[in-house]
Image: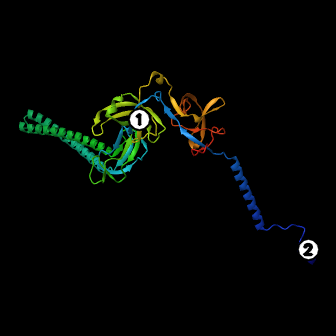
Amino acid sequence: MNTSADLLKQLRIDRQRPAAPPPARRSGWIIVVIVVVLVLAAAAWWFTRTPVIKVQTAPVVAISAGSNSASVLDASGYVVARRMATVSAQVTGKVREVMIEEGMRVEQGQVMATLDPLDADAQRTLSASQLSAARSQVDNMQAQLAVANADATRLQSLVGAQLVSRSQYEQATGQRDALRAQLQNAQRNVQVASDQLAIAGIRSDFNVVRAPFAGVVTAKAAQPGEIVSPLSAGGGFTRTGIGTIVDMDSLEIEVEVGESYIGRVQPKMPVEAVLNAYPDWKIPGEVIAIIPTADRGKATVKVRVAFKVKDARIVPEMGVRVSFLEQATPQQASRPQGVRVPAAALVERDGATLAFVVGERNTVAARVVTTGMVMDQDRQVVTGLNAGDSVVLNPPQALKHGDTVAEAEPDATE
């Protein structure tokens, strides 16, 4: 049993043991530690991150052997598509589903839209029922003809034995011949019903609108629930097409040349085209044909010009300025093909000529290029670059392969 002295000893306070800090004070120290760690992490990211370099860029432009030829005539025109179609259904009906959008590429035969097939399905079901009924009629006539054949054969033997009259035999053979004719008619009805079923199937396929050729959708004209028809209807409630597709490989330039100057233009003549949207991009081309008729109101003649370069930036209805060039001399024709870039985009490093091309996510790729002749402020590049590439102007010494860049203002790199 504990004595009073033991109990007093247990209640005594030990002043040598340090007191535990209050909970609020411990929480404050934890918050301070977390803040310090976050500040150190942010500082480490700031000092170790890859800096974004501000640069100016320029496009790489295609050149041709005759690009330095003198212009004998300048004219304005538009980019047009040789193959363009507003696709419509072959029958009138209500649109059930539209499967195209502007800018979408479609292949030949691809489904663009479907119409409500209720009428076509009903007609096909009716044709199938008529075919089944015609076949049943043939079966019935064949059974009757078999009985008539048997009767005629039996009566023929009885006539020889003079057990029945010849009139009865002739009546039986007449009935047999009539049934034979009816059977042939029923068989023709089966063929007609079969053809009608095939036609119903074809008409049912008319409810599916398909692309007549491969191209790009430039306009979507109908929505689900609207009525479309191959014929124009008044009132504005009926659409005449599902959408418009353009074969981008058929793009060309249509230019109107004054009658007084048409004598300067010849088929196969080289041209240089400049789109209004891209004034620094010179596109080589060639005269396809001179349309043999004039517009008396404007006193002009249409000229078709082909692009020698295909590019996604060229779209229908763009304005274009065309320079008709004189025929290239043998010296000009022998010049190598290639592209032209500003001379400021080329640098010498480690004995090689480099150009920095801006790619995806604004990262640059260092490319070794082979240069050609000097073209004013530009240089010809034979290998290493492609038309349409974007190159860095005046690349900084610190710029290297894989760096991230951003477009600077025109005076930011001065």
Camera sees residue 148: no
x%, y% of residue 222? Answer: 36, 50
Left/right placement of residue 18 relative to residue 412 reads: right
Which residue sits at x=44%, y=29%? 70
Residue extending furthest top?
A: 330
Image quarter of the N terminus: bottom right
- Distance between the Cα atoms at labels 1 and 2? 111 Å
Camera sees residue 294: yes
Would you name the residue on which mark 2 appears? Answer: 9
Q: How many numbered circles does the render carry?
A: 2
Label 1 or label 2, whichever comes before in sequence order: 2
x%, y% of residue 402? Answer: 62, 39
Which residue sits at x=8%, y=35%? 159
Left/right placement of residue 244 relative to residue 175 reads: right
Residue 226, above or below 297: below
Name the residue nearer the viewer: 225 or 287: 287
In the rendered structure, which amino acid carries the disc numbered 1?
Val
Name the residue nearer the viewer: 393 or 246: 393
In the rendered structure, which amino acid carries the disc numbered 2?
Lys
Residue extending furthest right?
A: 5
| Quarter of image, res 324 | top left
Residue 279, above or below 114: above
Would you name the residue on which mark 1 appears? Answer: 322
Asked which secondary structure carries label 2, the reply is helix
Label 2 environment density (alpha carbons within 10 Å; few <14, some 14–19, many ≥20): few
Name the residue nearer the viewer: 86 or 205: 86
Label 1 environment density (alpha carbons within 10 Å; few <14, some 14–19, many ≥20): many
x%, y% of residue 227? Answer: 31, 52
Asked which secondary structure carries label 1, the reply is strand
Which residue sits at x=90%, y=76%? 7
Please identify, in this view, whether the residue under mark 1 or under mark 2 is nearer the observer. 1
